[in-house]
């Protein structure tokens, strides 16, 4: 399978899953920041764009697999995460170490609770890209399974990332996540069976 076909099928899978759950499509999420160039502009470094796309994918994989080391490798030391949940005050986690510690605790609690998580992601839309910084946005559908049971869509969200390049390596310096609806769990709280939507 060519790289193009893999990317196309991955994107179509994400789109199909979002269309399969119309009640969870983007409604309340804040729109991504306006792009600084036309979506079809070709004046960018293709190698950097592939690296950033892979970087975002690696972060999502780390979150789904509970891989603390992989997660840390995707983040810049100054990384900060902003959560904008409808009906709740905005929340920020500042610093790679603090975010890594929070997620490590969440991974451990999820393992103890028998909870697995999967993010279905749209291809990234690049809002801007320079030689050493870039912004990209994706739409996410988060699904969960408890003790090997059925998978359930839990929430959909808009996520925007800022990436920086240092020493030839791209890392994420910031993330903003805006779920489409309010969540019944606080930021950093492991998802338990009781948090799942009814079948």
Image (cartoon, grey):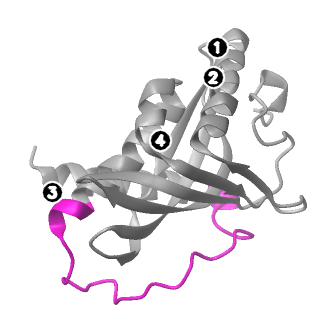
Name the residue located 75 percent from the left edge and 32 percent from the top edge.
199
Q: Nearer the viewer, mark 4 or mark 3?
A: 4
For this rendering, which residue is in front, 122 or 153?
Answer: 122
Mark drawn on residue 111: 1
Residue denoted by label 3: 4
Task: Specify few, some or many for label 4: CA neighbours under 10 Å numbering under 14, 14-19, or 20 or more.
Answer: many
Q: Which residue is mark 4?
A: 60
Upstream in sequence: badge 4 or badge 1: 4
**Alpha-carbon span between mark 2 and mark 3:** 33 Å
Residue 67 appears in view: no
Q: Give the mark, 2 or 3, whose residue is nearer the N terminus.
A: 3
Outermost residue on the left side: it is 2
Q: Is residue 130 left or right of residue 188?
A: left
Find the distance from the CA under tag 4 to the CA under tag 1.
Answer: 17 Å
Q: Which residues are magenta?
A: 20-49
Residue 27 horizontal/vertical position (percent): 71, 70
Q: Are marks 2 and 1 in contact (CB under 8 Å)?
A: yes
Instruction: Answer with mark 4 or mark 2, whichever residue precedes in sequence.
Output: 4
């Amino acid at each position: 399978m060519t790289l193009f076909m893999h990317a196309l099928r991955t994107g179509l899978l994400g789109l199909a899953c979002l269309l399969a759950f119309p009640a969870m499509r983007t409604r309340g999420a804040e729109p991504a920041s306006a792009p600084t160039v036309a979506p079809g502009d070709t004046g960018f470094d293709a190698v950097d764009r592939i690296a950033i796309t892979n970087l975002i994918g690696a972060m999502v994989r780390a979150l789904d697999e509970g891989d603390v080391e992989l997660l840390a490798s995707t983040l810049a030391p100054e990384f900060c995460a902003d959560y904008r949940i409808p009906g709740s005050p905005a929340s920020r986690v500042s610093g790679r170490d603090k975010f890594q510690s929070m997620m490590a605790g969440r991974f451990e609690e999820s393992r103890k609770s028998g909870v697995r998580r999967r993010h279905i992601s749209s291809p990234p839309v690049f809002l801007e890209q320079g030689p050493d910084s870039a912004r990209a946005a994706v739409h996410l559908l988060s699904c969960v399974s408890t003790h090997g049971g059925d998978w359930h869509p839990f929430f959909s969200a808009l996520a925007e990332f800022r990436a920086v390049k240092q020493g030839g390596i791209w890392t994420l310096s910031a993330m903003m996540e805006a779920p489409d609806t309010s969540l019944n769990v606080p930021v950093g709280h492991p998802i338990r069976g009781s948090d799942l939507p009814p079948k």
